[in-house]
Image (spheres, rainbow, N blue to C red):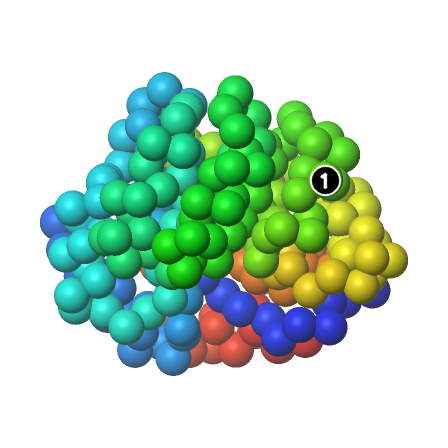
Amino acid sequence: MPSALDLILAPSILAGDHAALSGSAKIVEESGLKWIHLDIMDGHFVPNLSFGPQTIAALRKTSNLFFDTHLMLDNPHLYVEVFAQAGADLISIHVEPNYDIQATLSKIRSYDCQTGIVLNPNTPAQAVEKYLTQVDLVLIMTVQPGFGGQKFQHQMLSKMKTIHTWRKQQNLNFRLEVDGGIDLETASLCKANGVDTFVAGTSFFKAENKKAFVEKITQP
Ligand code: DX5
Ligand code: ZN
């Protein structure tokens, strides 16, 4: 049961060239894509560090892409303003840390950013059920967050199906996104379970023929 929404590929710049991130963003743009996925890591919620609002602000000046900003932070509520001001178009926050999620989603929206809620592989779908009417996007992690290049966790397919079913039953139209180990093969498995938005870092930046890769991932 595929999604009714148009399919979007959002390459993760974490797999890009960290010595020239604007060049990596250009590659995404030249591949005819509209979204780019920006992985923000604090070294606490995930055991890795990536880049901060200053980098996003600098990229904003050079790119018209839609900044799909994934906050892997222990205290995302403390950083909504700075990332919104840096130029994030969508800010997604994890459901696992202990903070006021409801208030943070409202805060994201108050800055005219779209909202996303994210769940890790070990977090059951029920953890995000009560937020579905307030978000523009649900992100299902298909790897443990922190690093690119990990192996797709197939047991996440049933979670995609569950959340896609809730979306249809409640007549909602948030995007359903997956992130981690997404390539042509795993993307088609996710598509069959209602996913419409794909984060791909390693597979996109390693693809010889990016146009063909994009075609295949975004065809229904
Ligand atoms: C992992 C990040 C992912 C990652 C993508 O914490 O959230 O976006 O960069 O991973 P791959 O390289 O598997 O597509
Ligand atoms: Zn991500």
Q: Is residue 172 left or right of residue 208?
A: right
SS state under label 1:
helix
Residue 190 sits in quarter: bottom right
In the rendered image, the vertical position of residue 158 relative to residue 173, given as above or below:
above
- The picture places residue 198, in percent across and down from the top left corner, at 54, 59
Q: Closest to the observer: 87 or 48?
A: 87
Amino acid at dot 1: Lys
- Residue assigned mark 1: 130
In the rendered image, the vertical position of residue 66 relative to residue 58, given as above or below:
below
Q: Closest to the observer: 68 or 121?
A: 68
Task: Answer whether residue 22 is visible to the viewer in this image.
Answer: yes
Q: What count of labels does the image hold?
A: 1
- The picture places residue 168, in percent across and down from the top left corner, at 82, 61
- The picture places residue 35, in percent across and down from the top left corner, at 41, 66
* Quadrant into which the C terminus falls: bottom right
Q: Is residue 206 left or right of residue 213?
A: left
Image point (23%, 40%), residue name = 51
Task: Answer whether residue 143 is visible to the viewer in this image.
Answer: no
Image point (32%, 23%), residue name = 43
Question: Mark 1: few, some, or many residues within 10 Å (few <14, many ≥20)?
Answer: few
- The picture places residue 213, in percent across and down from the top left corner, at 48, 71
Q: Closest to the observer: 181 or 164?
A: 164
Image point (51%, 52%), residue name = 115
Q: Residue furthest right?
A: 169
Residue 191 sits in quarter: bottom right
Q: Is mark 1 within 8 Å of ligand 2?
A: no
Q: Is residue 11 left or right of residue 123?
A: left
* Quadrant into which the N terminus falls: bottom right
Q: Closest to the observer: 71 or 21?
A: 71
